[in-house]
Image (tube, rainbow, N blue to C red):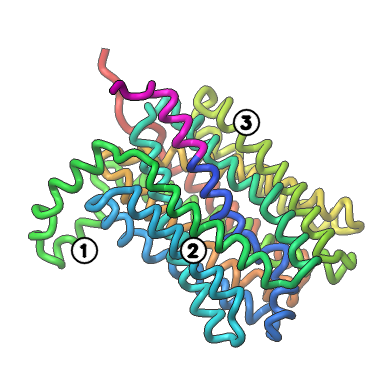
Amino acid sequence: MTKPPVTQRITYLLIMGISAKLLIDTTIQLFNPFLTMIAEGMGISAVALGGIVAIRGIMGLTAPIIGTVADKIGYRKIMQISLAFSGTGMILAGISQNIILFSIAIVITGIGHAGYTPNLHAYLSSKLPYEKRAKGIGIIEYSWALAGIVGLFIAGFLISKFSWRAPFLFFGSLLIIMSIIYFTLPVSHLEKKGEKLKSKKLIIPIKSRFFNFFDLGSNARSAWGTIIVQGLNIFAIMQVMIIHGGWLNSEYGLSPAYLGTIALIFGFTDLLASIYVSIAVDKIGKKKSVAIGVAGMTMGFILMPFLNTGLYLAVLGLIIPRLFFEFATVSNLALLTEQVPEQRGKVMSLSTTFGLIGATLSSAIGPISYYSNGVTGLAAVSFTSGIISFVIVIMVVKDKTYTTAG
């Protein structure tokens, strides 16, 4: 029996990756436009719910551990388990009747988020050459945009028609189904190799394994810089997005259905950025693309308070930094995959960890920034993070750490 062509297998992997990541990304973004509605349904404040979402982000600290396990038992298994965790957590949150069960459920989803995305990126990157890496990663990241175009639009409809619980139950069930469908994904030769080396890795003393885990070799400075940039960028944008629903609702009276429409607009913005990454970044250069994206995002934060004079301008003030953020982040993912090629899974997991740490801090700080100092407070905090990120990109990060012979 002949194997399907490589392009056909890659296409199938991309379709499966986008499909599952669409669900994951929708559950991650769900609180952004609907934070105050979900909080009201739970009978708690938006700040308290922001704290719970922050705890979810702390689960990103499990990503490096999960990534290490993935090197031993295979990416596909970890992705399946992660999807099942996310789905179970969403369903539990949807049926919860008290804050304790709801919080536990959100923590479970956080573990699922931490395990899925970095292993998806590592899995796909191991099959794509560096000169096509941005294209592949860019296509996978269409899912983040589609989560806004499709996922959050559906969530807004479900909340309006039923209740705040409906999106949790709906997307949770789909995640469980997708975890089963993932049995159809092929096992890569790298994962088989990891299985064979499993017994050898286990004999390394625990203390040595701990310190070796954070050793990224001769390119450590650039690798860590690229990882930190990911965290700073995510903090900068999520600090705004976690409370933008409450902002637009309180200042312009937007209902859940209208916030779902706004999410649809944001989704098209993200999709535009991801498409451009998949088309142009391999040609422009990955580091240069990250620098352009971070600079545009940071300048966008300056404009936010000045544009907050009417609904349409306020939404434009959100679109500008988000567009450049998406461009910077997807470009940075492609850049990350080749910082330490022999430790790709580890680097992607650490990137996810720092990204979730950024999201964790933003979930706690965003509502406080807004309710304390309004849009100006949000813009000032995010601008500071963006400036630090830009300096690191320019001064620390390197592109393609090896040269091709011949």
Assess whether mark 1 and mark 2 are in contact (beta carbons under 8 angstroms). no
Q: What secondary structure is found at the residue carrying circle 2?
A: helix
Q: Secondary structure at mark 1?
A: helix
Looking at the image, the residue that sits furthest to the front is 1
Q: Quadrant of residue 405?
A: top left
Q: Position of residue 274 (x, y in %)?
A: 61, 37
User: At x 89% / y 65%, what residue is drawn?
Assistant: 252
Q: Which residues are magenta?
A: 1-15
Q: Earlier in the sequence, mark 2 or mark 3?
A: 2
Camera-side residue of 382 and 280: 280
Graded by Cα atoms within 10 Å as few (under 14), some (14 to 19) or many (20 or more), the crowding at tag 2 reads: many
- Residue 201 position by quadrant: bottom left
The kind of residue tagged 3 is Tyr
Q: Is residue 163 above or below residue 11?
A: below
Q: In the figure, is residue 275 to the left or right of 57?
A: right
Q: Position of residue 40 (x, y in %)?
A: 74, 80
Among numbered discs 1 and 3, the one appearing first in the sequence: 1
Residue 39, percent across and down? Answer: 70, 78
- Check the picture and name the quadrant holding the N terminus: top left
Regarding residue 376, the answer to whether it shows in the image is: no
Query: Comparing marks 2 and 1, which lies closer to the viewer?
Result: 2
Q: Badge 1, how many Cα within 10 Å: few under 14, some, many 20+? A: few
Disc 1 marks a residue whose amino acid type is: Phe
User: Residue beneath label 2, please?
Assistant: 86
Q: CA distance from mark 1 to mark 3?
A: 39 Å
